[in-house]
Amino acid sequence: MFVGREKELNKLNQMYQSDQFQFAVIYGRRRIGKTALIQKFIEDKDSIYFVGLEENEHDNLVRFSTAIASYEHQDIMSGFNFGNFENCFKEISRLAKKQRVVLVIDEYPYLAQSAPVISSMLQSYIDHEFKDTNLFLILCGSSMSFMENQVLAYKSPLYGRRTAQFKIQPFGLQEAQEYFPKMGKEEVFVLNTITGGIPLYLSYMSSEKDIWQNIQDGFLEVNAPLFQETDSLLKQELRDPKNYNSVINAIAGGASRLNDIANKAHLESSAVTTCLNNLIDLGIVAKKVPVTEESKPRSRKTIYIISDDLFRFWHTYISKYMSAIMRGATDTVMEIIKNDLSRFMGQAFEKLSQDYLWQHVSDSKMIPTPFVYLNNWWGTDARTKTKVELDIVGITPDEYVGYFGECKWKNEPISKSILEKLIDLSSLFSYPQKHYFLFSKSGFTPACRELADKVGCKLISFDQM
Ligand SMILES: Nc1ncnc2c1ncn2[C@@H]1O[C@H](COP(=O)(O)OP(=O)(O)OP(=O)(O)O)[C@@H](O)[C@H]1O
């Protein structure tokens, strides 16, 4: 079953309809669904599909030649060789002069590593040959650093040639719901969060089981599919992951500033900075500043969070209790997860609520004046000299209108006092016009509704999102 990716498919099909040379770059982390998207796109089209492997130039050349030759001669199954890559490209050019041909090179980084000349050769063919053909070239890869630095970046021979690029994102709640049509929305949200929205990991979950059984079978057994997946992902992307694991553990354990992370991980700040930058490139960690500092080039309030929810889940519960799990004490670990999961889900619910507002930014009934910044805010309440946080603060470009919100992923309805506190904290900001939002997993108390009516606060429950 294939779900979602409508925007990407629409764009690819629109490009396909043009009668010009097209070159799409598709990339994204492992298991995110790049190949599934490409297979869906080419299922009804004439195409040559090749996947680069970690093997030598000769073996990649033979498989590339065979894939091309079998386009016209389906009986050619293996062992065909055009002799060199130049001849392969000549043949592709000949075919694509006659009709629209989609050429997919999946796992392009492996091909380019085995035959380093390939990117320059492709560049030359694009500039001199392919541009006058009906070729639709797709390069795909999961090594983020390779695709970003050696295909898309200025220094790459292929720079500026692509006609579209797609960074494939994790499934959102809607796609996950399509994936599990029979499961309750709340369960889908939890499972999509703990699997990081990665389609392959979601496919390890089952609508026949409840959340706890899915966690048990997916993460808590020594041979469970996700028991060591984050480790193996780091090993595939990084040469020496041990410092990286310590840094992620430190953040999962509550450290968020550079110095705190360095102390907790027992590493020098400079080593932590290198790890953090690489983890940010991989989409595992994100840098955050209070929303009011977003327009500043440098903020002293920078913190680091684990933005990849699979890593956050794994480092919060699995790595921390690894010995217990190895010794079979999974019931105890499950009890810990059950008692803490609402807190864990809070960060994901905040993100869902912020995304909800971004999706409605042009809906003038909800957002009278569009904001340009929307994010968390933290700082000091000068009246009480205490540290305070707001889940959502949105700001319009003229700083005339402010949007303030709180999000609660709890099993009880939001009470009036939460709204009172939100209104009180909003007085720390001097925007002349203020709007309020509350987002709740379990609704709102009557008193909260009454006050919301009075102050024009919008109440949004999880079912509506
Ligand atoms: N859009 C989708 N709908 C349903 N299932 C999907 C979708 N995308 C991916 N999957 C599931 O996830 C699995 C992994 O996806 P896929 O192989 O396309 O990822 P990938 O990004 O190409 O991974 P890698 O980089 O590791 O090769 C698929 O076999 C399929 O089970």
Image (spheres, rainbow, N blue to C red):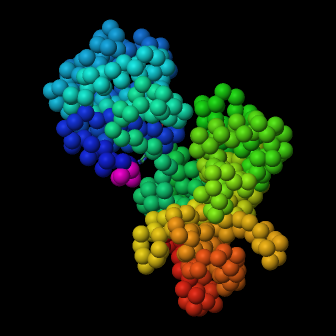
Residue 104 image-quadrant placement: top left
Determine whether, in the image, residue 358 is placed left or right of residue 448.
Answer: left
Q: Nearer the viewer, residue 146 or 156?
A: 156
- Tell me where the magenta segment starts and ends, as one range: 3-7
Q: Position of residue 250 (x, y in %)?
A: 77, 47
Which residue lies at the image location 34% right of the left edge and 14% below the top edge? 85
Residue 283 in view here: yes
Residue 245 in view here: no
Which residue lies at the image location 21% right of the left edge and 43% below the top edge? 17
Whether 266 is drawn above or below 334: the answer is above
Which residue lies at the image location 41% right of the left edge and 22% below the top edge? 119
Q: Nearer the viewer, residue 164 or 464?
A: 164
Ligand 1 positioned in quadrant:
top left
Would you say residue 4 sits in the magenta stretch?
A: yes
Residue sitting farthest toward the top: 83
Which residue lies at the image location 65% right of the left edge and 54% below the top edge? 288
Determine whether, in the image, residue 105 is placed left or right of residue 14.
Answer: right
Residue 118 image-quadrant placement: top left
Q: Position of residue 456 (x, y in %)?
A: 54, 86
Q: Position of residue 458 (x, y in %)?
A: 53, 80
Whether 192 is drawn above or below 420: the answer is above
Determine whether, in the image, residue 15 is placed left or right of residue 397.
Answer: left
Whether 132 is drawn above or below 375: the answer is above
Whether 5 is drawn above or below 335: the answer is above
Q: Nearer the viewer, residue 401 or 270?
A: 401
Would you say residue 170 sits in the magenta stretch?
A: no
Residue sitting farthest toward the left: 98
Determine whether, in the image, residue 278 is placed left or right of residue 339.
Answer: left
Q: Position of residue 287 (x, y in %)?
A: 65, 50
